[in-house]
């Protein structure tokens, strides 16, 4: 049975295809993760093979091939109907490159109704000509984009694509943010954000709840899960920005504070808001 390409894994769920990050595999081979970042015109998704930070092929040329897709949400991400053409574009690009030179797909980006595949390649002779000919013949409506540059040190991969100061928790937050983006959310503005926490005893839960009240959180519900190691559940909420940096600061604070009380932070959720 053939396996899905990294791009198709990225979007596999919700009727779309969406890559799900698994923290234990962080330093395994061929580790593709996705995260989002805010740019001048809106949100950008980057999916990257983290394993290449440890072991890289000796390819000294960077190649970016991109194209525009027509059917997208107002946040710049593709509708389900646009995915097949997006995959066909990437598959045809990869097939053309494979005929000419050794290469490695390192990342892909989605931004403002455009998708970009990022490769590092061994040779560039004839590459631009072959790609331009193929893309103009098969995908003229996609406004193809081809960029080739020398990058012996893999600076673009390290300095632009690779996430800064990330952790497993950071990537778990981004997995959910990416899920929202794929549904058309632009991550802008404030909205109610819910958080779930668990504690060993009711005293610790009450103490944590008191501290949350002082930080303007609402205490939405409590529950007792008899069979859980940490049976005392608390659900809290607050109006917050879900900008990626703000989310990570917020969840880090809640993880740290609950951990100091021998509790456990169990994640967050919010409503999807579609850009009008």
Image (tube, rainbow, N blue to C red):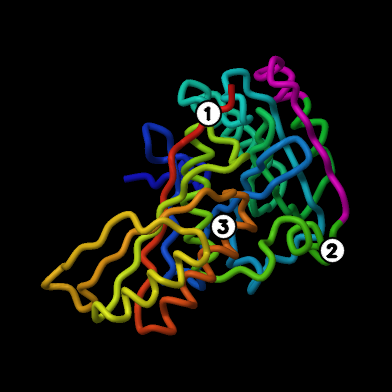
Give the image location of residue 126, x and y in percent: 82, 38
Relative depth, front residue between 154 and 133: 154
- Residue occupied by mark 3: 247
Relative depth, front residue between 261 and 20: 261
Q: Residue at x 41, y 56 (%)?
A: 218
Relative depth, front residue between 174 and 89: 174
* Dot 1 or dot 2, earlier in sequence: 2
- Mark 1 and mark 2: span between their CA atoms? 41 Å
Q: Is residue 144 magenta?
A: yes
Q: Residue at x 42, y 80 (%)?
A: 259
Q: Is residue 1 magenta?
A: no
Q: Residue at x 46, y 36 (%)?
A: 272
Q: Which mark is residue 152?
A: 2
* Dot 3 or dot 1, earlier in sequence: 3
Give the image location of residue 227, x and y in percent: 12, 73
Task: Give the residue at the far right of this rendering.
Answer: 150
> Helix or strand or loop: what does disc 3 sit on?
helix
Q: Are the two marked residues, 1 and 2, in contact with CB atoms closer than 8 angstroms?
A: no
Structural crowding at the residue carrying mark 2, measured as other residues with C-alpha within 10 Å and reported as few (<14), some (14–19) or many (≥20): few
Report the quarter where the C terminus lies: top right
- Mark 3 and mark 2: span between their CA atoms? 35 Å
For the image, the number of numbered tags is 3
Tell me the magenta residue range.
133-150
Camera-nearest label, 3 or 2 = 3
């Amino acid at each position: 049975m053939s396996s899905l390409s990294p791009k198709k894994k990225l979007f596999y769920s919700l009727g779309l295809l969406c890559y799900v990050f698994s923290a234990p595999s962080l330093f395994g081979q061929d580790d593709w993760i996705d995260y989002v970042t805010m740019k001048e015109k809106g949100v950008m998704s980057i999916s990257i093979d983290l394993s290449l930070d440890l072991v890289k092929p000796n390819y000294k040329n960077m190649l970016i091939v991109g194209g525009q897709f027509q059917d997208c949400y107002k946040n710049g991400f593709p509708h389900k109907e646009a995915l097949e053409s997006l995959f066909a574009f990437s598959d045809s690009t990869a097939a053309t490159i494979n005929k000419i030179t050794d290469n490695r797909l390192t990342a892909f980006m989605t931004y403002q109704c455009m998708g970009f595949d990022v490769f590092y390649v061994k040779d560039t002779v004839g590459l631009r000509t072959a790609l331009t000919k193929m893309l103009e013949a098969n995908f003229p409506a996609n406004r193809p984009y081809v960029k080739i540059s020398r990058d012996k040190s893999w600076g673009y991969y390290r300095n632009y694509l690779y996430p800064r100061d990330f952790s497993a928790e950071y990537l778990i937050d981004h997995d959910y943010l990416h899920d929202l983006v794929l549904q058309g959310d632009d991550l802008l503005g404030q909205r109610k954000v819910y958080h779930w926490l668990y504690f060993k005893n009711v005293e610790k839960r009450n103490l944590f709840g008191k501290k949350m009240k002082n930080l303007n959180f609402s205490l939405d519900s409590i529950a007792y899960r008899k069979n859980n190691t940490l049976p005392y559940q608390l659900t809290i909420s607050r109006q917050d920005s879900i900008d990626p940096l703000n989310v990570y600061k917020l969840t880090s604070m809640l993880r740290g504070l609950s951990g100091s009380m021998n509790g456990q932070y169990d994640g967050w959720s919010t409503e999807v808001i579609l850009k009008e």
